[in-house]
Structures are given as C-alpha cells and as structure tokens.
C-alpha cells in the first residue's frame, strides 16, 4: 500500500499542476480563478490547509524510529505517514480514557501518563482525538475526490449521449436513470457494499453507482439546450462530425457544470459516508466512524463530548468550505455571467 | 453561365397532430454559377428550412421527402452517404447564420474556431492555418487580425462576429454560400458594411450566394434574381428589377407597398392584413387567398399553376392568369 498512497500523492500533484497550467493558458478560466480567489480568500486558504494535512498523511514509508514506549514490533514494519511520525500514535498509552478537562476522580485518582499532551483528549482506546481528526481529512478527501472521479465520467457519458442523440438512446438512458432513482439509495448502497465487500475503494464505487443520476440529468438537459444552439448548427454546416462537435463544442460548454457539480458532489459524498459509517459499513478512519464510536460514550456521566465534537467540527469545517467554494464557483463560472463581461 | 444548383420538387415535412405537415411544399428552382439568388418571404414561410434542406440539415423530426432532388454541379446530394455529405458542407456549400451572437462557441477564441473549420477539410499545419486565418480576417475587414485571433466572442461586437462567421464560411472558397438573414441582427450602419463585404467577396471569389431575407432593401443591394415564397410555396420568381419594379403577385405587391421609404409622406402605410397561418392551418387552393385583395372564386379551390410571363419571370396567381386571358383574345 506504500506505493499506492505515495503514487496517489504524485498523481494528485501532477494533475493539479497540469490543471494550473491549463487554467493559466486559457484566459477565460484564468480570469474566473482570479475572481474566485478575490471572492473567497479564506475558504481557499482553509481548503489548502486541509489538502496539506491530507497530503502529509499520504506520504509514507516503512522504517524509522517508532515512538517511545512502543513495544509493538509490528509497528516498525508498517508504513507510517509524516503525520504518524509527527504524532507517534504508538505512544498513546493511557491506562484509561483521558481528557484534559476531566476531574481527577474520573480516573480513580490514577495519574495521567502524558498529562497535557492530548489537546482534545483521547477516545475510548486512549488514542489522541486531535490526531484522529487530522487523519480524517485524508479519508474525507479520498472519499469525495475518488467518488467524484467515478461519477463524472459515467454521468457525462450517459447525459451527453441522451441529450445529444435523443430518441431511443434518450429513452434507454432515462429508463436507467428512473430505475436507479426509484430504488431507495441507502438500501442500494448497503446492498452494493455487501456485494463488493468493505473497503475504501468499494465504498467509493458503491457511492458512485448510486449518485451519478442527478449529474446525468443535469448534463442531459444542458446538452439538449446546447445541441440546438447556432454554433452547433454552424459546426454541422461546416461539415464537423458529431463526435467532434461533442468534443469541441458540447464538452467545453459543460465544463463549468462539471466543476460546480464536482464540488457539490464532493460534500454530499463525504456526508453520505458519515451515514454509512453510522450504519457500520463506512470507511475505516473516517469522521463518520469516529462519530459512530463516540455515540456509545455519549451516555456516560460525566459526559464525554470531545470525541464527537472534534469529528463533527472537522466535518463541518470541511463541508462549509467546500460549499462556500461551490457557491462562489457557480457565480464565477456561469457562462451567462462570463458573456456579460 | 453554368448551372450550379438545381433544386426540384423539394418538400420538407414535420410530424403533426394529424399526419405529416408539409412545411416546404414542392419547391423547384435553379441557380447559375456566380449568381446571387434571393429567397424572400415573411417569417415562417419556410425559407430557412429550404436552405437547411439544401445542406441536408433539416432538424429532427423533420424529413426531406424522397421525391426531392438537389443537384450541385451535377452531383445528386440526396444520394450522398453521410460522410460524403459532410465533405460537401463547408467545402462546397457554406452557411452564414442570422445571429452572430450565438453562432460562435463562447468558450473558444474566434481564431482557433476558424482554424478548426479550415483544418477540417485541408491537411495543413496549425502555423499555416493560423497565417491563413489572419489573412482571411484581414480580407473580411477585421482590424488588427493578429490581436483579434485570440479574442473571445464576447469581446467582439456583433458586426465583427458576423465578419468572423463570414471568414469561416468563405475559408474553403465554397461554390455556394447560403446567407440566412445575414444582416437582420445588426445595426443599420453595420448592415451596410456587411452587405458591401458580401458583394465584394461574391464578385472576387465568384461564389454564388443564396440570400435568405425578408428585407427588400438588402435584396435591392445584392440580388440578381428573386424567389418569393409564401407559406411553403414559391409564388413568384424573376430578375431583381422585375420583382421590385413590376411585381405581378398580389403578395409581392403588398410587400413592396409596405416599405416605409416608398410610401408618400403623411399617408398611412399600406399593410397586408392578417398573418402567415401556421403550417397546420394552411388553406387549400392558393395559400395567400384569405389575405388577398384580388381574390377570385377559384383561388380558394384550386392551387394556381406557375405561369411564365417571359423567359425570366414567372408567377403563381389565378388573378394574373385571368387578366392575361382577358387581354389575350
């Protein structure tokens, strides 16, 4: 898994720089991004911090010193990310669960082994909540990003085919869409995960299969509109083939839609995973799982609230930034506002 | 002059609530090489559809009826396979659209769009193509073509956009240029410039132009011959002077009388009462009969035959036929 995780980092960085170059070359996109930066500077900064945390947790290698107090021989042979190396989770060895805010008698007067080290307390197994929360960023970005990567090609293919060619193709695609939309998505999700098995990839694929419908509908409607426009007609009158028309005239004019939907999909996917985790079929290490575990501790007295709060706050922060970004993107990329420039 | 385009028995139908509705009804005409033929009629009379049918681009679910024949330089377009027809479009027939605002892709710079058109039919490097396009821009009167190459449609005025469209259309030196109301969406001053450009291009390139318009001023500026259409049928055809100064069909008459510049001062402008009926409600007999001031009894019953007034002028009207029959004996 070492090469996969590091490879993903390389791929993400490469794609990001390619996208950056492409945006820089195209004046329309360059201008849109400039306006975006002016409109949502704090959101962009927050998102870059989140991304950086995820990257720090993705770059990993085997070996190096494990933390003090680690008697675990296996840990030395496991790949550990930069974040792991920084926090040294092997050393989280509280005798019971602890918290900076808890009263002395809470622990039966036993002294803490690492007093003051856990900023947000620990969970029931003695793991640092702050560390777990930070690790959740990578999982959340993975779920959102990977699922969107699955959803967008499927939705584009079906949506464009239905909208552009119409007739029987449209009927077939719409039948598929209606069928999928009429199955309760949560049931379908759980059934798919049962079939595919548990794991990050499987959950992402299951989420992808159940959520391409709305984007496909949107793409279909937009393609339907674009198809009738004069410049598509003009391209036909110049002898451009249907495939080329889709590639050069339909797809670029759908780009804003794809970018906006990507961002909105992203947040809904992260949210959907939280619900799945609550049902016990989520991705390991996600905030959903943290919340799921924290709910058992919620009934204790004195109440253990920091687990739940930390995961929820992180989830809220990420989703809020993503939604703010999506909102700004919609304003910036809408072709109607572009044309009015 | 050699015959360039021969359209015979062209019919286009669309599915309606009760069977197929004929929107372009049995139209025949010919065009000579280097000629400007103007197709004139009100909105909804089928003139744009006729143009699209010549390129075999009738939008679905419309259909060109099988009896229709379209010959371009002796080649039967109706029999061509789709890829061959695609090659004819752009290379032999090109089209200029009414709305320059929407006829250019908004997310692509205008230069590359013309390059795309050029490279579609010709194997040239992108550098050659760029040089050619800048030359074309210069030719159609776009100032500073090098800078304009990188401009996006929203950065150009309507007149400039129409010039880009014209550059794109003439890039392959087509034999036939179809101009669908090329000046309707433009300011009056820009209209004059575009007309001037079209006339100049037409004479230097020797391209034939099928000019679709409802603006008789444009007809007067550009056309050699005129084909009047009403409700999907041709009603009168003739040389420009014949149509504009000696029209025979009551509809042509009416149109000419309703031009503001020709009306006497202080007098109410003449009009043709009523509107063109929709294709589903076209009357039997002569379709203009309900609005016609010279209506005879036969008009609502029988479709008027085409009547040759002389070698170049023909008209489809019972009233004209009756007056000729009276005068003849």
Image (spheres, coloured by chain):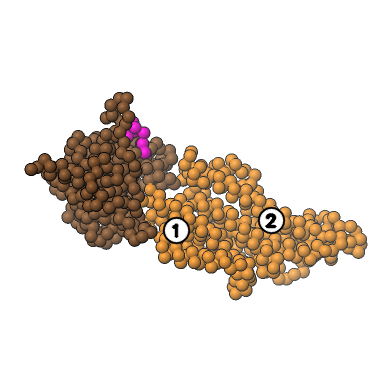
Chain colours: A orange, B brown
In the image, which disc is placed on residue A315? 2
In the image, which disc is placed on residue A163? 1
Please, what secondary structure does the residue beneath circle 2 have? helix
Label 2 environment density (alpha carbons within 10 Å; few <14, some 14–19, many ≥20): many
**Residue A86, quarter of picture:** bottom right
Q: Chain of mark 1?
A: A
Residue at the far bottom in the pictured view: A195
Question: Is residue A253 shown left or right of residue A192?
Answer: left
Mark yes or no: residue B169 visible: no
| Quarter of the figure that contains the C terminus of chain B | top left
Front residue of A173/B242: it is: B242
Question: Is residue A231 shown left or right of residue A202?
Answer: left
| Quarter of the figure that contains the N terminus of chain B | top left
Q: In percent of the image, x 38 and y 56: which residue is there?
A: A244
Image position, residue A148 (x, y; %):
56, 59
Please, what secondary structure does the residue beneath circle 1 have? helix
Q: In percent of the image, x 52 and y 54: which residue is there?
A: A258
Q: Determine whether B73 is above or below A168 in the image.
A: above
In the image, the segment drawn in magenta is: B185-192
Question: Is residue A140 shown left or right of residue A306?
Answer: left
Mark yes or no: residue B320 visible: yes
Callout 1 touching callout 2 (CB < 8 Å): no
**Residue A273, quarter of picture:** bottom right
Q: Earlier in the sequence, mark 1 or mark 2?
A: 1
Residue at the far top in the pictured view: B266
Image position, residue A9 (x, y; %):
58, 58
């Amino acid at each position: 898994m070492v090469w996969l995780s590091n490879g993903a980092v390389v791929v993400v960085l490469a794609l990001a720089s390619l996208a950056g170059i492409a945006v820089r070359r195209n004046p329309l996109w360059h201008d849109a991004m400039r306006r975006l930066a002016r409109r949502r500077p704090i959101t962009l900064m927050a998102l870059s911090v989140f991304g950086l945390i995820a990257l720090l947790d993705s770059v990993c290698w085997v070996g190096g010193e494990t933390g003090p107090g680690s008697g675990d021989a296996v840990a030395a042979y496991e790949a550990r990310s930069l974040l792991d190396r920084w926090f040294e989770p092997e050393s989280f060895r509280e005798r019971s669960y602890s918290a900076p805010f808890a009263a002395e008698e809470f622990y039966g007067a036993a002294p803490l082994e690492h007093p003051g080290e856990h900023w947000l307390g620990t969970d029931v197994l003695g793991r640092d909540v702050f560390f777990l929360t930070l690790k959740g960023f990578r999982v959340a970005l993975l779920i959102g990003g990977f699922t969107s990567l699955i959803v967008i090609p499927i939705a584009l293919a079906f949506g464009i085919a239905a909208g552009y060619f119409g007739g029987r193709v449209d009927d077939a695609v719409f039948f598929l869409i209606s069928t999928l939309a009429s199955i309760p998505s949560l049931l379908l999700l759980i059934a798919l995960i049962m079939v595919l098995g548990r794991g990050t990839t499987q959950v992402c694929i299951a989420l992808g299969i159940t959520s391409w419908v709305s984007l496909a509908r949107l793409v279909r409607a937009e393609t339907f509109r674009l198809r009738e426009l004069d410049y598509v007609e003009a391209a036909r009158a110049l002898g451009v083939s249907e495939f080329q028309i889709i590639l050069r005239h339909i797809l670029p004019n759908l780009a804003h839609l794809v970018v906006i939907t990507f961002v909105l999909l992203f947040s809904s996917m992260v949210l959907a995973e939280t619900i799945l985790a609550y049902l016990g079929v989520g991705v390991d290490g996600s905030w959903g799982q943290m919340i799921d575990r924290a709910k058992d501790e919620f009934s204790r007295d004195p109440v253990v609230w920091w687990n739940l709060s930390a995961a929820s706050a992180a989830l809220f922060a990420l989703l809020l930034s993503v939604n703010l970004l999506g909102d700004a993107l919609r304003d910036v990329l809408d072709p109607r506002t572009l044309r009015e420039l | 002059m050699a015959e360039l385009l021969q359209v015979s028995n062209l019919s286009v139908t669309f599915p309606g609530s009760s069977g197929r509705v004929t929107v372009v009804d049995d139209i025949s005409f010919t065009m000579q090489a280097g000629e400007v033929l103007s197709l004139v009629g009100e909105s909804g009379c089928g003139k744009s559809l006729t143009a699209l049918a010549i390129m075999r681009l009738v939008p679905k679910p419309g259909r060109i009826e099988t009896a229709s024949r379209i010959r371009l330089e002796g080649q039967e377009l109706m029999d061509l396979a789709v890829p061959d027809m695609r090659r004819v479009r752009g290379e032999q027939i090109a089209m200029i659209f009414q709305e320059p605002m929407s006829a250019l892709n908004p997310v692509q710079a205008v230069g590359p769009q013309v390059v795309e058109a050029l490279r579609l039919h010709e194997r040239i490097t992108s550098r050659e193509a760029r040089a050619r396009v800048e030359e074309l821009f210069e030719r159609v009167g776009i100032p500073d073509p090098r800078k304009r190459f990188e401009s996006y449609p929203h950065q150009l005025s309507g007149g400039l956009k129409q010039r880009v469209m014209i550059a794109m259309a003439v890039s392959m030196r087509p034999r036939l240029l179809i101009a669908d109301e090329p000046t309707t969406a433009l300011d009056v001053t820009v209209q004059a410039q575009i007309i001037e450009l079209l006339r100049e291009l037409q004479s230097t390139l020797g391209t034939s132009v099928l000019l679709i318009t409802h603006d008789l001023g444009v007809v007067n500026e550009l056309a050699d011959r005129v084909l009047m259409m009403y409700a999907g049928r041709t009603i009168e055809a003739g040389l420009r002077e014949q149509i504009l100064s000696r029209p025979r069909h009551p509809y042509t008459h009416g149109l000419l009388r309703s031009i503001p510049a020709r009306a006497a001062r202080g007098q109410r402008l003449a009009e043709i009462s009523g509107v063109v009926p929709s294709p589903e409600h076209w009357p039997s007999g002569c379709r203009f009969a309900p609005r016609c001031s010279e209506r005879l009894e036969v008009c609502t019953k029988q479709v008027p035959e085409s009547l040759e007034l002389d070698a170049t002028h023909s008209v489809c009207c019972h009233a004209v036929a009756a007056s000729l029959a009276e005068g003849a004996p």
